[in-house]
Image (cartoon, rainbow, N blue to C red):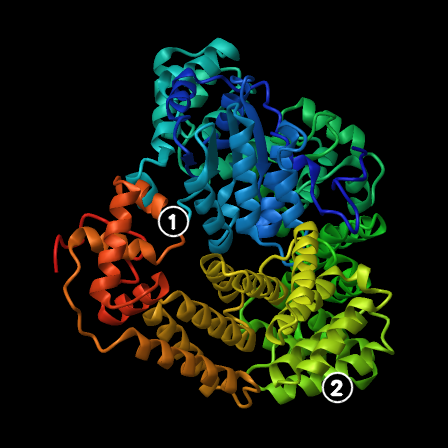
Amino acid sequence: MSGDQPARGRLGQPLLIETKLTPPRNRSEFIVRPRLIQTLDRLASTPLTLIDAPLGYGKSVLAQTWCAAHPERGIAWLSLDATDDDPVRLWTYIATSVDRIRPGLGSEALTRLQAPAADVDEAINELVNSISFYGDELVIVLDDLHALSTTSLESIERFVEWLPANACLLVTTRYDPPIALARLRGRGLLDELRAHDLAFTTAEAHALLVDQQGLPIEQGDVELLVERTEGWPAAVYLALLWLRTHDDPAAAIRSFSANHRHVASYLSEEVLDRLEPEQRDFLIQTSVLPRFTAQLSDAALDREDSASLLADLERSNLFLVPLDSRGEWFRYQHLFGELLQLELTAADPTAAARIHGRASSWFRERELVEEAVEHAFAAGDETTAAQIVAEHYRTVMETAASIMIVHWVERLSTDALLQHPALAAAAGLVAAVNGRPLDERRRLFAAAERARIENPAAWTPDVECMVRLGSAVWRDGDSGRGVANARRAVELAANSEGGLGVPAVASLAQAWFFEGDLEQARAAAQRAIDMPEAPQTPYARIGALALLAQIDFECGRVTSGEHHALAASAEARTVGIGKSWIGGLVHLAQAASLETKGSLHEAEREAIKATALLHELDLPHTYALLTVAQIRIRRGLLGQAATDLAEARAEIDSFADPGRLASLATAVEDELETAQRRAGDGRLREPPTGAELKVLRLLATELSAREIGATLFVSVNTVRTHIRELYRKLDVNSRTEAVARAGTLGLLSDSHVGDPGPDLPSNT
């Protein structure tokens, strides 16, 4: 990696910073602590080991040292920071790091994560499967987990629960992450090292200060230092640097305080003040850069000697942490860096903004968009930040890092968005594709809409097209409004340079579908697929294919529907559908295909997936609920179907214009009432026995008679005997009728379907 390229890729590729995937190099002034290495050896069989302690307790050093002591294990390292607080970005880094252990190990997960609407759970599943097949011991290290918030941490928690036996997760953090630690601990999935575990013992301090560094101090002096520092490794290390400068280190120890304020005072008075002015200024000024090279330092500080200064500082061990094997990228030890920044602010309150501004320009010239934007924000220059985002948002929208647009736009002021309404509109689309909350989408689109009146020059066809497209796809319960917005989006896209033609036509097809005009919907969907630019917009094309399949199945065109469903599924597997309305349409197409083939249990699963994906998107969610209800009626699960129908009805009642959903709900309701009448009046010829009840509840699954027998540890002939008796007692002639009648009679519990557990009664 060259000195001016900290990221692995440029635009159109994952925006990864290579040095985050490599453990920092250990300094010469550290000791291997066998006590802790042995402890980690003992904990390595636990899925999650948490090294949890405040700043300066040597968490990262311990993790790195332990990994180095086990070269036989595959080590995937990731140094976290606040920019990783997005599940897609986080798991892209993790999968990339795992892939470095053996090429291809993380490739399936990375493919999932490249979709603009990436499904993180699916990517985690792929990664877990790959690790399991890998077989050899593997350790994933997440350094500085405290940089993440709830959403990202929930994905980490799920990963821990799914980890195969050959893998473990080693995490460092400054404080307890907000996940279910007690539950993980109770299930034997978590072990911990805390601050008191990491504190230096007298023996360890002696090994560092006397055995390794040769300081002329006695055992009692070491004990005093450990007592006064409370074993805080950072303070012991600071003391080492200080004591090396004293003629009488034993006397100096007696004046050293464990109070952290005294340590800060020591840093400024005993370290910084002893430096040459040029070195001191360089340290203080570069401290505002999260990571830096000599070239970046020259540009940010407007100087030409950064390379030689960095070389001198690295040799002097002044808390400079190398980030790569070539010694080009550095950062400061966190505590030291924070204190340096305080010094800079005290000396010149405006200096940090100037440095960030120059750093932003340096990154911008190299098209390293993320760093350029972040430094512009840090400089307090939202004008430049907005300009950089405006220059690159279209390209970033096509990458796995698209969610960054939302994060950036949310930091821009109302006035900045008024000048750049395209950013708010683009962020609204990205937010929707990534399943962000409905209120957030509405807020972003509303911010874009302000420019129509207050800054009409910025209200371009591109901006209006994105807003109309968003309003067409997410109709907020107004079918007629969805059609009107989709029509307008198509008109605008014809004069737009934003490549929105295919999404606009596909959205019109969907709007007509929910309005009830299936022929126009089919024609528009076919048009979207046939447009020359369709291959460049695969997600809109996949949505149109899935919608075509759904329409064909509804209209009895089974062969055509199957063709389009297969095409939508195949393309979705290639590019990934993720958590989006497009993904929901694909699952609904698959459900319709399976239902046509009589595979009702599998059809139900696909429809449930669609419901889960679309639960924030009002109209598609309602349609998915009705689909689930209809399939469950045909499976005989009448109680569950009634619940689904009631939920759909409640949503329909809240809509201003539900379109065809009201008539669809009526049709499902009629089918349910017919099924309930067929199920009987609630009287039994004879109550089923406990053994028959167990079989009855498994009849509600897709298990064959032989498979039911294997589940219950009885012969297939016994199962068939029970089924015949159940048909007689329930007065039915088929499996579906038996399940439906049992549901009406209360013999099936939704929480126990398919679970013939020991709590079932032995008789009724």
Q: Position of residue 503 (x, y in %)?
A: 74, 70
Q: Is residue 315 above or below residue 429?
A: above
View extreme (left): residue: 763
Is residue 726 found left or right of 40 in the rendered image?
A: left
Judge by depth and name the residue closer to the eye, 716 or 459: 716
Judge by depth and name the residue closer to the eye, 191 or 683: 683
**What kind of residue is marked 2?**
Arg
Q: Residue, x 26% and y 39% (percent of image)?
A: 713
Q: Is label 2 or label 1 in front? A: 1
As measured in the structure, the alpha-carbon distance from the residue carrying label 2 to the one carrying label 1 is 62 Å
Q: Secondary structure at mark 1?
A: loop
- Which residue matches tag 2? 452
Q: Position of residue 246 (x, y in %)?
A: 53, 19
Q: Is residue 312 above or below residue 734?
A: above
Is residue 351 found left or right of 235 in the rendered image?
A: right
Q: Position of residue 131 (x, y in %)?
A: 54, 32
